[in-house]
Image (cartoon, helix red, strand yellow):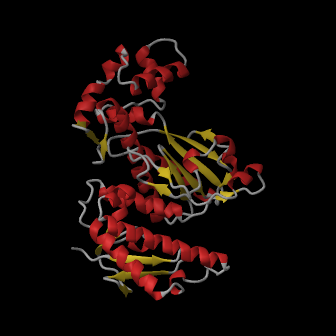
Amino acid sequence: MLPIIQALDSGNGNKSFFQDLKEVDKLPDSFFCLSFHQEFKDKDFFACYLFGEEEKLLKNLDKHLVKRFNNSLLKKKSFLNSFKNSNFDLKNNNFWSFVPLWFKQDFLEIENEIIKEFAKTPVPLNYSFLKTFSILLNKISKRSLCIQEDLAEKDKFKKTNNYIRYNLFGTITGRLTTFKNSFPIMTFDKKERKILKPKNRFFVEMDYNGAEIRTLFNLIGKKIEEDDVYDFFAKQIGLSKNREEIKKETISWLYNPNSFNLVFDSLVNKEEVIKQFYKGDKIITPFNREVFCDKEHALNYLLQSTTSDICLEQCCKIDDFLVKNKMKTFISFVLHDCVVLDFDESEMKYLKNIKQIFDKNARIGDFNSNIKIGENYGEMKKITL
């Protein structure tokens, strides 16, 4: 079995790492751990929290051990609260240096046992890309959002954390959600978006056009050349319907398993797509993600899950490009089929390159994104390159 690495993190840059319950300065090349830390980025690590939803994983462990683990977490929270109530400076001090030694040792021992049990669980088939995604999402979670305090809407967010904490296991399909103590970026009301401003010069949003429709066509080896998927369907129908009518008709056909459209069904045999990816009681996506569902929801879940994973994988490629070129621009946040970058004005010359990375050579084919730009997230204007 690989060694187990544990981290005691004060949340202010003070970290200690332990192997076999002993503090170490150097990390091994491969190891099991409970969760990801930036120091693990270039290591071959197996983070147990990426094996699945934490609550479900804990249900499969020894109940007595889980109870001890939860009690240990409650004690940690109690110590934190007592320090805060006594105005102890947690920002400039190492929390773990001031808790009783018995608690520190007990905490490490229990967590070590939990990791040992998790390590017996088969590594998920999609672990490698979950690991890649988690590194990017962790990086995003370390950057605070810039909120315009002079706006009235700011009052609604006084008690809200201005950091985004994504949950990789918040939905059955793997689409991102956020934890309760996160800034609510996934459910952020459009009317309030102007409170967010970039740390650089602009926000640049790249949003896949007709994302799930393009996913469907890519899955069967077909490509939609048009910039707007609804222009493509308008040509197929050949009638003088406006875009909204065609969009409504297309979405109804796509998501209603009982719908029938002579023109659309001649382009894609949805039943054949389901047969290809639906295995017994689950779909297995091109990312080896297993989604348990009935046949009625199979196509919907396949498209949702695959599109979300494509967006994340392309975002990881963008992040690699930004790092490689030592750019000030960074990914501010990611939505289901959309990425928002905090763009430095001097680096706008790279926007075409970044759009190319986002749109092309995805795991199943090419996509096309619309671009918006703005000085705050609520006032974004569409541009063409």
Image height check: is 342 above or below 22?
A: above
| Residue 177 relative to residue 52: left or right | right
Q: Residue at x 43, y 68 (%)?
A: 70
Is residue 12 visible in this depiction of the protein?
Answer: no
Image height check: is 240 above or below 12?
A: above
Picture quarter containing residue 63? bottom left
Q: Residue at x 57, y 45 (%)?
A: 187
Picture quarter containing residue 121? bottom left
Q: Residue at x 33, y 35 (%)?
A: 218
Image height check: is 294 above or below 34?
A: above
Is residue 319 visible in this depiction of the protein?
Answer: yes
| Quadrant of the snapshot with the N terminus | bottom left
How many labels sit on residues? 0
Q: Residue at x 37, y 86 (%)?
A: 24
Residue 161: image x %, image y %? 61, 60
Image height check: is 349 above or below 218?
A: below
Which of 86 and 126 lies nearest the eye of the viewer? 86
Residue 86: image x %, image y %? 66, 80
Residue 324: image x %, image y %? 45, 64
Q: State the residue lying farthest toward the top.
A: 239
Q: State the residue lying farthest toward the front.
A: 64
Residue 385: image x %, image y %? 55, 41
